[in-house]
C-alpha cells in the first residue's frame, strides 16, 4: 500500500506546486503556442518518469527507432491500465495529445495539464461530439504538427494478458484524413502494476514495442478499409511475442 500512497501524494503535490508554472506557460502560450506545447510536454514527460520510478515500474522499450522523427504520427495502442498513459507519455519526444474519456475533463488541475499537452476529451455516447473531436485532431495534426495517441478498444481491457477488444475504426480517420503515419504500439504487463490487485501498486516489468509505421498516404482505398484489422493484428502479434515479459 505504501507505493500507491507515495504515487498519489506525488501527483497531488505536482498538480498543486506546478500551478505557478502553469500560469507562466499560459503567458508563453499567448505569444508562442508551439513553445508552450514543447515546455508542457517536457514537464509532463519528466513527471511521468518520476511516477514510474516511484511505482517501481521497469520498462523495456522496443522499436523506438521506428517512430518517424520528422512528422507527427498517430500512435495506436492496446489499453490495459491507467499506467499505459504514464508509460508511453514518458517516452514521447514531441507534443502528443491523448484521446481521453470526457469524465477526466471534470478533474480539477489534471484536466488543465491534459489540455496543455493537447489532449482531447471524447464522449463515447455522443456520435456528433466524437466526430468533432476527430475533426479537431485532424486539423491539429495538419496545421500544428501535433501527434496523437489513441486506444481504439474504447475502454480498458480487463481480460487476459495479450488479448484485445474490437477496435473502433473511427479514430483511425485522424491518420487517414491528415496523411500522418500510424505507429501501432503493443503494451504488455501494465495491468499488473495496479488494476490486477487494486489498490496496491506492485513493482512490475512492462514492455512497450513500437511497430513498423503504416504510411496511410500510400494506402489504396481497399487497404484503408482493412486498416483497423491490420493494426490490431500487428499489435496482437507483438503481445504474443512479449508473453509475460520475462525474456527481456
Image: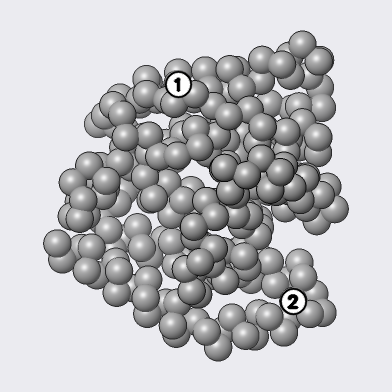
Front residue of this view, candidates 244 and 166: 166
Q: Where is residue 143 in the image (x, y as percent from the top left)?
A: 85, 53
Which residue carries the number 1 mark? 236
Which residue carries the number 2 mark? 29
CA–CA distance in space, label 1 to label 2:
40 Å
Q: Position of residue 225 (x, y in %)?
A: 71, 16
Q: Earlier in the sequence, mark 1 or mark 2?
A: 2
Which residue appears farthest toward the bottom when viewing the image?
Answer: 20
Q: From this viewpoint, is residue 92 visible?
A: no
Q: Which residue sits at x=66%, y=20%?
A: 227
Q: Where is residue 131 in the image (x, y as percent from the top left)?
A: 72, 42
Q: Residue 108 carries which label?
A: none
Front residue of this view, candidates 202 and 134: 134
Of the 4 image quadrants, the one containing the N terminus is bottom left
Which residue appears farthest toward the top when viewing the image?
Answer: 222
Of the 4 image quadrants, the one containing the C terminus is top left
Q: Which residue sits at x=30%, y=41%?
A: 191
Mark 1: which secondary structure? Answer: helix
Report the side of 173 relative to 203 (left or right).
right
Front residue of this view, candidates 121 and 94: 121
Q: Position of residue 189 (x, y in %)?
A: 31, 37
Vertical order, 26 against 149 (above or below): below
The answer to the question of whether label 1 and label 2 lie on touching residues, with beta carbons closer than 8 A, is no
Amino acid at each position: 500500500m505504501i507505493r500507491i500512497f507515495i504515487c498519489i501524494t506525488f501527483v497531488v503535490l505536482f498538480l498543486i506546486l506546478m500551478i505557478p508554472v502553469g500560469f507562466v506557460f499560459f503567458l508563453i502560450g499567448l505569444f508562442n503556442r508551439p513553445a508552450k506545447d514543447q515546455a508542457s510536454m517536457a514537464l509532463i514527460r519528466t513527471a511521468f518518469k518520476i511516477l514510474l520510478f516511484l511505482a517501481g515500474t521497469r520498462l523495456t522499450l522496443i522499436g523506438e527507432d521506428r517512430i518517424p522523427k520528422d512528422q507527427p504520427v498517430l500512435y495506436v495502442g492496446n489499453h490495459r491500465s491507467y499506467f499505459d498513459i504514464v508509460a508511453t507519455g514518458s517516452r514521447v519526444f514531441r507534443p502528443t495529445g491523448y484521446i481521453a474519456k470526457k469524465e477526466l475533463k471534470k478533474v480539477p488541475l489534471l484536466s488543465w495539464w491534459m489540455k496543455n499537452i493537447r489532449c482531447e476529451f471524447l464522449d463515447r455516447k455522443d456520435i456528433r461530439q466524437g466526430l468533432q473531436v476527430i475533426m479537431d485532431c485532424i486539423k491539429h495534426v495538419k496545421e500544428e504538427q501535433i501527434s496523437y495517441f489513441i486506444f481504439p478498444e474504447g475502454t480498458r481491457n480487463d481480460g487476459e494478458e495479450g488479448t484485445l477488444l474490437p477496435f473502433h475504426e473511427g479514430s483511425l480517420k485522424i491518420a487517414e484524413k491528415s496523411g500522418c503515419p500510424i505507429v501501432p504500439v503493443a503494451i504488455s504487463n501494465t495491468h499488473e502494476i495496479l488494476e490486477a490487485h487494486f489498490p496496491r501498486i506492485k513493482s512490475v516489468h512492462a514492455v512497450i514495442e513500437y511497430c513498423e509505421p503504416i504510411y496511410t498516404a500510400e494506402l489504396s482505398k481497399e487497404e484503408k478499409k482493412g486498416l483497423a484489422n491490420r493494426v490490431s493484428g500487428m499489435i496482437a502479434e507483438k503481445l504474443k511475442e512479449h508473453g509475460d515479459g520475462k525474456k527481456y
